[in-house]
Image (spheres, rainbow, N blue to C red):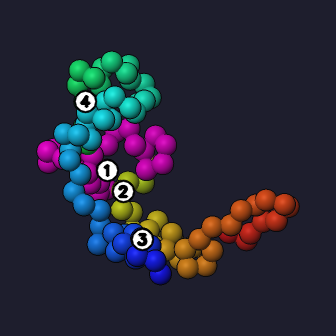
Amino acid sequence: MTTESAALADTLITGWPEPDLDHLRARNARSVWHPMAHPGAHQANPPRIITAADGVYIQDDEGHRVIDAVGGIWNVNLGYSCTPIKQAIARQLDVLPFYSAFKGTTSTR
């Protein structure tokens, strides 16, 4: 294992360093396109940084906890950290974490 890959593995195990949230807000407002929002709006009012989620709730970096009324539209309709879904994902990761369907092949899952 190279020094670089060892450092990456250590980062993945121990977690990423705490980000500079003010820098992240400013960079996000300048560089990220948020659907359904005018780009200039985030220049004036930088977006909230969501740091945690559980069930139907999300929490921002300032500790505000609110119902996530938008996330479920696309992919969180059963809430965050849903135990049966996490268990199903873990089982699938043990069996076949990914498979490409190129060249006429498929998988059973």
Asked if residue 13 can be seen in this view, the reply is no
CA gap, disc 1 to disc 4? 24 Å
The correct choice, above or below, for 85 with respect to 56 in the image is: below
Of marks 2 and 3, which one's residue comes earlier in the chain? 3
Question: What residue sits right under mark 4 in the picture?
Answer: 46
Say the numbered circle drawn on residue 80. Answer: 2
Q: Earlier in the sequence, mark 1 or mark 3?
A: 3
User: Disc 1 to disc 3, how far (Cα)?
Assistant: 38 Å
Asked if the residues shown at circle 1 and circle 2 are in contact, with their CB atoms under 8 angstroms apart, the answer is: yes
Q: Amino acid type of disc 1? A: Val
| Disc 4/disc 2 C-alpha distance (Å) | 24 Å
Query: Disc 1 versus disc 2: distance between alpha carbons?
Result: 6 Å
- Bounds of the magenta segment: 50-76
Q: Is residue 101 above or below residue 31?
A: below
Q: Callout 1: few (<14), some (14-19), or many (20+) C-alpha neighbours within 10 Å?
A: some
Identify the element where label 3 is drawn: helix
Instruction: Place residue 99 in its image quadrant.
Output: bottom right
Q: Residue at x 49, y 43 (%)?
A: 74
Residue 32: x and y in percent read 40, 33
Residue 17: % across, % down: 24, 60
Query: Which of pointers 1 and 3 indicates the residue nearer the eye?
Result: 3
What residue is shown with label 3? Answer: 4
The kind of residue tagged 3 is: Glu
Give me the C-alpha separation between circle 4 and circle 3.
34 Å
